[in-house]
Image: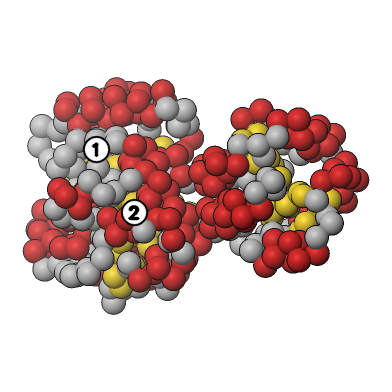
Amino acid sequence: MRVLVASDDQAISQQIRGVLVEHGAECPAGYLVSLDLAADRSSVLRPELLALVMPSDWSTGLTVLRETRTMAPHARTLVLGPANDPKRILETLKQGADEFLDRASVEAELAGALGRFHAACQRVQSGPSGGRIIAVLAPSGGSGASTLAAGISTALAQEHGQAGLIDLRLGVADQTAMFNLRPTRTLADVCEHVARLDQSLFEQSLTRHASGVHLLAAPVSSTDADRVTAKGVRRGLVLARVRFPYVVVDMSNVLTPEQVEVLWQADQILLVARLDYTAVRNTRRTIDTMAELGIGRDRMRLVLNACGQRRQLDVKQAEEAIGIKAAQCIPYDPAAIHAAVNNGEPIVLKSRFSKVNKYVRALAISVNGVKK
């Protein structure tokens, strides 16, 4: 059980941590954060339990509570503070706290809360854990990552009734053309209103396709692209994870802070590469860069695209150079791809009987975990 402790009082943070460790909870030093970092860290660390110590300024504490609940909606939240004002306690519970604990009796109160949490976990062995985020990243341009992202999201939507798709290729916005959509709002609008962004406002920024894919489009103009922030992307991902069973993110090959935020939160990272020297070299470089950022290879999967062309590199050569065995090799099928792209339909809808469709669906099954 991972527990994040948010407090501006270091002494009580250490006291809480001691109780947590004594009861078998996981709370390393990096999980002790100040209140101003609570929301951001909870979205990245994804704690199962959050202990928030109210500051003397109660309104500030309630603001932190609301923001943290938005960023970590599935974490059970314990709020610690003075238990001498029933109105404040009631307001705290209304703002999203699961329990209010008396700060004057930290050890006893926290021990009781942990016992109740363990009991609830035993009663509900498999509660909702939120949707999975699938990042699709091509280290070299022209590798077909956007086409695959559109196809995977559509296949997942057909399987689950709906799926989210976030286009993070700022200034390019290929996904609007892939689905022949005309969004009225984009990711830039989500980022601009991040301070008051809730589930309702987030959903107003989505554009629905008949397949069940809900697109959060990328901005086209450079001015709008400049409005996209890592914080806005982070919150958008959290809300998308709550809303959809699967969220596919079509990424740019330039690892800006906004793109890195996706890599941090992704459950799986699909690295799409062609079988040529430049693509293989860039893929290896990207893997090394992600390793420096602390992103483990266990979340990375190599997808070789447009396979079967003359004078390509051998698959084994590419795997050895990249350092990862290919999870899927998508065949070269330009007629099917061009038909889908030129008609504004995902490959799994436009070219249903093509060879590439079969492989894209297989790739979707591999991230889905459900085979029909």
| Residue at x-position 34% and y-position 54% | 191
**How many C-alpha atoms fall within 10 Å of the one at disc 1: few (<14), some, or many (≥20)?**
some
Query: Can see residue 20?
Result: yes
Q: Which mark is residue 253?
A: 1
**Quarter the C terminus occupies:** bottom left
- Residue 98 position in % (x across, y down): 72, 60
| Residue at x-position 61% and y-position 62% | 128
Q: Earlier in the sequence, mark 2 or mark 1?
A: 2
Q: Is residue 94 left or right of residue 116?
A: left
Q: Secondary structure at mark 2?
A: helix
| Residue type marked 2 | Cys
| Residue at x-position 16% and y-position 50% | 223
Which residue of the protein is positioned furthest toward the bottom in this rendering?
210
| Residue type marked 1 | Asn
Q: Which residue is mark 2?
A: 191
In front: label 2 or label 1: 2
The answer to which quarter of the image holds residue 257 is top left
- Residue 168 position in % (x across, y down): 27, 50
Residue closer to the observer: 277 or 99: 99
**Quarter the N terminus occupies:** top right
Q: Which mark is residue 211?
A: none
Q: Compared with residue 92, is residue 260 higher up or lower down, i.e. above or below? A: above
Disc 2/disc 1 C-alpha distance (Å): 21 Å
- Residue 370 position in % (x across, y down): 49, 61
Residue closer to the observer: 92 or 88: 88
Q: Is residue 152 left or right of residue 81?
A: left
Q: Compared with residue 346, is residue 233 higher up or lower down, i.e. above or below? A: above
| Residue at x-position 40% and y-position 46% | 231
**How many C-alpha atoms fall within 10 Å of the one at disc 2: few (<14), some, or many (≥20)?**
many
